[in-house]
Amino acid sequence: MKKQLFVLLASMLFSFPLMSQVGINTTSPKATLEVNAKNLDGETSEGLLSPRLSGDALHNADLKGVYREAQDGTLIFVTAAPSSSNRVGQTANIDSRGFYYYDYPQNSWTKLNVTVPIHKISSNQVFSKGVSEINKGAFSFLSPAALTKVNQWISKGLNESKLLAAFNKATNKEALVSKLETSKSIYHQRVHIEDWDNIPGIVKSSYVRNGLSSAKTNSSWNNAALDLPAIEAANFVDATAVELQAGTKIYRVTGGAPGGGYWTLQKPGSVGNVIGGTAVQPAWNDFSKMFVYEVPQGQTLKVWLGSTAKQPVEQGVTNPHLPGGDQQIFIPQVIRNQAFQSLIKQTQLPW
């Protein structure tokens, strides 16, 4: 293996002077270097893996004079910010994980930021770099560690004014920091600070229960294991036992187990469809992955199909609420066996 690798590298190195362009997994490169994926089915990891160094390692390199004019433009991935005592010299601007490039004229590592035209940014995506100057005094009650976390949350899109209002209202500020730190997603954090304007799909009115009050059974299936239990029936306004035919695709958005009980026939087009339409509390889900299951040929899939019932946006919060109303599917536990699990595939989120 080592001999083969040496031959490959040697052939590439000696061919550079003879070739104006180099291609990997392509015979017709369209630039100085073009790299194509070897597989397009998601079965193998693809991509370019940059050198990974900690901020402290880069500070060490600065002390030894490693990065100078010849390294101008070098790109690396920083795995962790340097310790506070090492945030000087070339590493003064490294404040978090991410891609950085070496800027020789500035003699510093500069973060590689992705910018989006302002007209393409929605109202809940206007980010800042942390607590604004005007509010720094207002957050002075926080410990340095907590303030660092707050800055990170704000930079990721958490509303600074709502966050400050939540801290002012909280009798136990450390508990609020802990809640925000352990939240499933930014939508869950927004629940904790009551930033209702930036949680898609919610309705600003009081929750009134409209789910079924008892279990449902289907006599033609004649199997108690296929019944819709009362605890699950409460999540439906109505529910009908159906058999999905071969070729039918169903979808599930979750950050947890892909083989859970709740699915949809319609592919969700937004986080708001999931939170509002199928009444999924942000405390239950981080909405980070989408999965698809297709009923195999020659088979059917026994499920319960119906309109989603309303849900409170959070336990103990009745206004606003999650309206539901979209069609959802519940798959009985007995159906979600190993054969079912093995056919679930991850697919790309549409948002």
Image: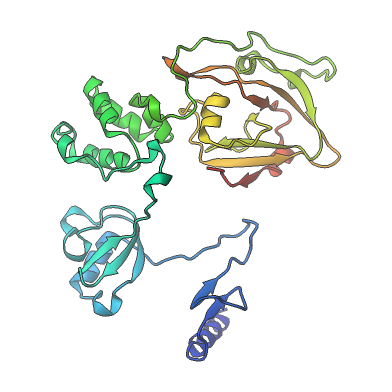
Image color mode = rainbow
Give the camera-side residue of 125 and 12: 125
Q: Residue at x 65, y 57 (%)?
A: 41
Front residue of this view, candidates 347 and 84: 347
Dividing the picture into quarters, in which one does residue 342 lie? Answer: top right
Identified at 39% across, 67% down, the residue is: 51
Q: Is residue 332 left or right of residue 161?
A: right
Instruction: Judge whether 281 appears above or below 61 on screen.
Output: above
Residue at 24% of width from left, 57% of height from top?
Answer: 82
Q: Position of residue 215 (x, y in %)?
A: 68, 12
x, y percentage for residue 325?
Answer: 60, 20
Q: Nearer the viewer, residue 224 or 201?
A: 201
Lateral position of residue 85 relative to residue 334, left or right:
left
Q: Residue furthest front?
A: 119
Snapshot quadrant of residue 265: top right
Residue at the spot 55% in from the left edge and 62% down from the top edge: 46
Q: Position of residue 52 (x, y in %)?
A: 37, 63
In the shown orientation, is residue 66 left or right of residue 239?
Answer: left
- Please determine whether, in this image, residue 238 is positioned above or below residue 195: above
Q: Quadrant of the N terminus?
A: bottom right
For residue 349, above or below residue 183: below
Q: From the viewer's perspective, is residue 4 above or below residue 38? A: below
Tell me the quarter of the picture where residue 154 sits: top left
> Picture coordinates of residue 89 (x, y %)?
16, 64
